[in-house]
Image: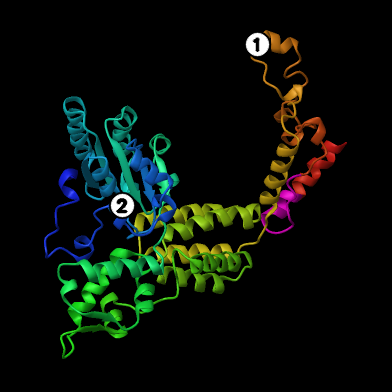
């Protein structure tokens, strides 16, 4: 069901003393908010929108623990709007419609804005997302969605087109350090104690850019640590590892390691080395990378680097993307591994990639070349009189379902964009096209 946060009270009310640390020290104003300077810093787009009070619906896209929920609450408080929060995991269409009905009454009778915050909006199905469209379009609600998945893939186009997407980044070391200092200084419990961290850099690494994970880890480590003789507490490296239940795998999902390791993975597959591909995939998975991110990259690779040398590659990759959505982790690792090995072992061709790049180059340097008359459609008498579709040859009437005919504009009639290799399935394609090209040239 929905959870209502009346915004007049939400900034001033204090969480219960037994609430988790991350909730107890949640920022109460934009000035307390740490991170995401590229959108909420002075003069930046989201801050300017908030300060103007003229909100549009928006989607926050970013990894866990970077401030998506906090920002939504702060926005609602700043513009004095009623704030509803739904989790897409357990909310249904009825929950959405109940809130929309209440929002209509608020707008009609009290002239008050309503913000509906949907956490994990990517888990809403099409019917649930469709239920929001009319109210968003009419301004009955301002929608704020939060997602860890690419909204281009997970949010329906009509809703996406009515929303501004803001990309939130994993928090850096300095951001996490400031959040921890603030918690130790202001929290109702921690501020009364003398607490030190033996290896703060290691703590930040284990947190992986996630403030919630950082604070939960510190709180757990404190429970596991006995005070010193003077009553102070020292969080050792071992206690921090115990709290996080793992050692650090050198993989920063939001930083250089993210890009370096996915690059090593792609190049291993392209280089036909399944062992390298599996190793770098394991590094990503153990570091907490989103399996869908890996699967998407394999979909692209299957066309860019394998193409028609093995058309089954793109089928494998897209099936992999679907399958991991069905089964989830940890079983998804097996599907990912099978696909990576298949793609690495497959024959390689970038002919399709080179073809579209060359064609795009011609389109941009020679724009608006006319379509040859014989290729044009002639739905009216006038078009027939002007020669549209005249002399067009119906390919199926020819031997082998082929007839010699020009399909490119006159300026490009001798272009060969697609040049298949002699590897895998493309060898067959090359032989057939060579035969047809010879006939066409005649």
In front here: 435 or 206?
206
- Look at the image and give the residue range highlighted in magenta: 417-430
- Disc number at residue 251? none
Q: Is residue 7 highlighted in magenta? A: no
Reading the image, the residue beneath label 1 is 380
In front here: 388 or 114?
114
**Quadrant position of residue 56:** top left
Q: In this rendering, is residue 82 above or below 168? A: above
> SS at mark 2?
helix
Q: In this rendering, is residue 412 above or below 63? A: above
Identity of the residue drawn at 27% across and 67% down: 182
Instruction: Give the distance between the C-alpha atoms of the residues marked 2 and 1, in whole angstroms.
Output: 62 Å
Regarding residue 151, the answer to whether it shows in the image is no
Residue 429 image point, x, y percent? 71, 49
The coloring applied to the image is rainbow
Q: In this rendering, is residue 346 above or below 432? A: below
Q: Dot 1: within a 10 Å radius of its alpha carbon, few (fewer than 14), some, or many (20 or more) residues?
A: few
Identity of the residue drawn at 43% across and 57% down: 292
Position of 313 with respect to 372 (left or right) is left
Residue 420 image point, x, y percent? 73, 51
2 or 1: tag closer to the N-terminus: 2
**Quadrant position of residue 435:** top right
Reading the image, the residue beneath label 2 is 30
> SS at mark 1?
loop
Identity of the residue drawn at 29% across and 34% down: 131
Which callout, 2 or 1, points to the residue nearer the camera?
2
Identity of the residue drawn at 18% across and 31% down: 106
Quadrant in which the N terminus is drawn: top left
Total labels: the figure holds 2
Position of 360 with respect to 298 (left or right) is right
**Quadrant position of residue 266:** bottom right
């Amino acid at each position: 069901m929905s959870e209502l946060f009346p915004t007049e009270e939400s900034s001033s009310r204090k969480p219960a003393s037994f609430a988790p640390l991350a909730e107890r020290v949640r920022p109460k104003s934009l000035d307390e908010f740490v991170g995401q300077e590229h959108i909420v810093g002075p003069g930046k787009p989201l801050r300017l929108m908030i300060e103007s009070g003229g909100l549009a619906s928006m989607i926050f896209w970013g990894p866990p623990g970077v401030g998506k929920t906090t920002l939504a609450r702060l926005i609602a408080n700043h513009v004095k709007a009623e704030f509803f929060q739904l989790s897409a995991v357990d909310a249904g269409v009825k929950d959405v419609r109940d809130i929309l009905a209440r929002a209509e009454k608020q707008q009609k009778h009290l002239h008050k804005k309503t913000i509906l915050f949907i956490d994990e909006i990517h888990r809403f199905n099409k019917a649930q997302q469709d239920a929001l469209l009319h109210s968003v379009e009419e301004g009955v609600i301002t929608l704020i969605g939060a997602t860890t998945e690419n909204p281009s893939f997970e949010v329906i186009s009509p809703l996406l087109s009515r929303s501004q997407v803001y990309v939130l980044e994993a928090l850096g070391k300095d951001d996490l350090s400031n959040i921890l200092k603030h918690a130790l200084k202001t929290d109702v419990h921690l501020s009364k104690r003398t607490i030190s961290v033996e290896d703060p850099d290691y703590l930040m690494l284990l947190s992986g850019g996630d403030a919630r994970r950082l604070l939960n880890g510190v709180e757990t480590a404190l429970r596991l640590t006995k005070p010193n003789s003077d009553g102070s507490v020292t969080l050792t490296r071992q206690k921090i590892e115990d709290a996080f239940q793992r050692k650090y795998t050198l993989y920063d999902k939001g930083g250089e390691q993210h890009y370096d390791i996915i690059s090593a993975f792609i190049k291993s597959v392209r280089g036909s080395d399944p062992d390298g591909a599996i190793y770098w995939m394991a590094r990503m998975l153990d570091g907490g990378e989103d399996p869908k991110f890996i699967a998407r990259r394999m979909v692209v690779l299957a066309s860019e680097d394998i193409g028609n040398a093995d058309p089954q590659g793109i089928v494998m990759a897209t099936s992999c993307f679907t399958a991991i959505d069905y089964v989830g982790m940890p079983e998804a690792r097996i599907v990912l591994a099978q696909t990576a090995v298949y793609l690495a072992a497959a024959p390689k061709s970038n002919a399709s990639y080179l073809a579209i790049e060359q064609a795009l180059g011609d389109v941009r340097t020679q724009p608006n070349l006319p379509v040859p008359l014989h290729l044009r459609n002639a739905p009216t008498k006038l078009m027939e009189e002007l020669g549209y579709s005249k002399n067009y040859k119906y390919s199926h009437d020819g031997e082998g379902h082929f007839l010699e005919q020009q399909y490119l504009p006159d300026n490009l009639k001798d272009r060969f964009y697609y040049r298949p290799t002699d590897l895998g399935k493309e060898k067959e394609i090359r032989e057939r096209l060579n035969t047809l090209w010879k006939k066409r040239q005649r």
